[in-house]
Amino acid sequence: MEKERLLSFIRDVLETCREETGFTGRQHVFLVDIYVKGGSPSSKIEVLVDTDSGISIAECLSVNRCLSSAVDANDEVKGLVGDDYELTVSSPGIGAPIKHLRQYIRHTGHLLRVQYTDGDREVQEVSGRLLQAEVLDVPDPFIVLEPVTAGKGRKGGRSEPVRLELGSINRAVVEVEF
C-alpha cells in the first residue's frame, strides 16, 4: 500500500471534517499520528486526534464517520485500503509519547517524564510538572518543567524550574498521577 498517499489523504480530509463536525472556533482538532497495518483487501487504520482541551469519545466518533465517508467515496483510496478496511479514531492514551507540538499546550499543568540531550550531548531524564509551553509561532520553541523528585515519606521534593528547548527533547510522556 502506498502509505504516504493514504496519510496525505487523511490529513486533507481531517481539514474538511473539522468544518463538518463543528470543531472550528470552539476547539480545533489536530492530527497526532496515523498507524496503518496491512494492505488491500483489508487494512487497519488507526488515527489519533486531539484538541487543546481534550477530545471526547463522541467527538472521535464524529471524526470517524467523516473520515470513513471520505474513504468510501474515493475509489483511489478505497483501492489502497481495500473494501474490508477497519478505521479507528481515538485520542492518544496516557503514557503515549507526545508527538505533536500542540500536545505540550494541552498538557500544561500535568506531570511529564522527559528524556533530553544536554549541552554535553549526554542523555538526561527529568520528571516534572509542565509549567509553560512556548511551542507555536516562536523561533526557539521550549517548555518549562518544575522537577519533582520522589522523597522518602513525602509526596515529592521540588527544585528550580528547568527550561528545555524542544530540539533537545528525545521523548516526552505524560505520567499518570495518583
Image: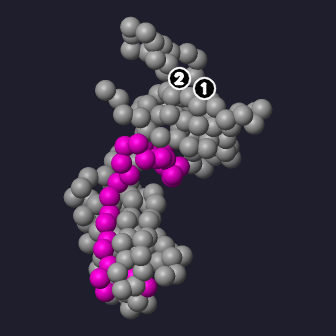
Nearest the viewer among 9 and 84 is 84
The residue carrying mark 1 is 162
Q: Is residue 64 left or right of residue 39?
A: left
The three-letter amino acid code for the residue at tag 2 is Pro
Query: Contact, CB < 8 Å: mark 1 with mark 2?
Result: yes
Q: Residue at x 60, y 26 (%)?
A: 162
Q: Residue at x 32, y 63 (%)?
A: 89
The three-letter amino acid code for the residue at tag 1 is Val
Residue 62: image quadrant is: bottom left
Residue 145 placement (x, y as % from top left): 54, 28
Residue 128 placement (x, y as % from top left): 50, 27
Nearest the viewer among 26 and 1 is 1
Q: Is residue 178 above or below residue 27?
A: above
The residue carrying mark 2 is 147
Task: Look at the image and tell me in which quarter the C terminus lies.
Answer: top left
**Residue bounds of the magenta highlight:** 80-106
- Label 1 to label 2, Cα distance in Å? 7 Å
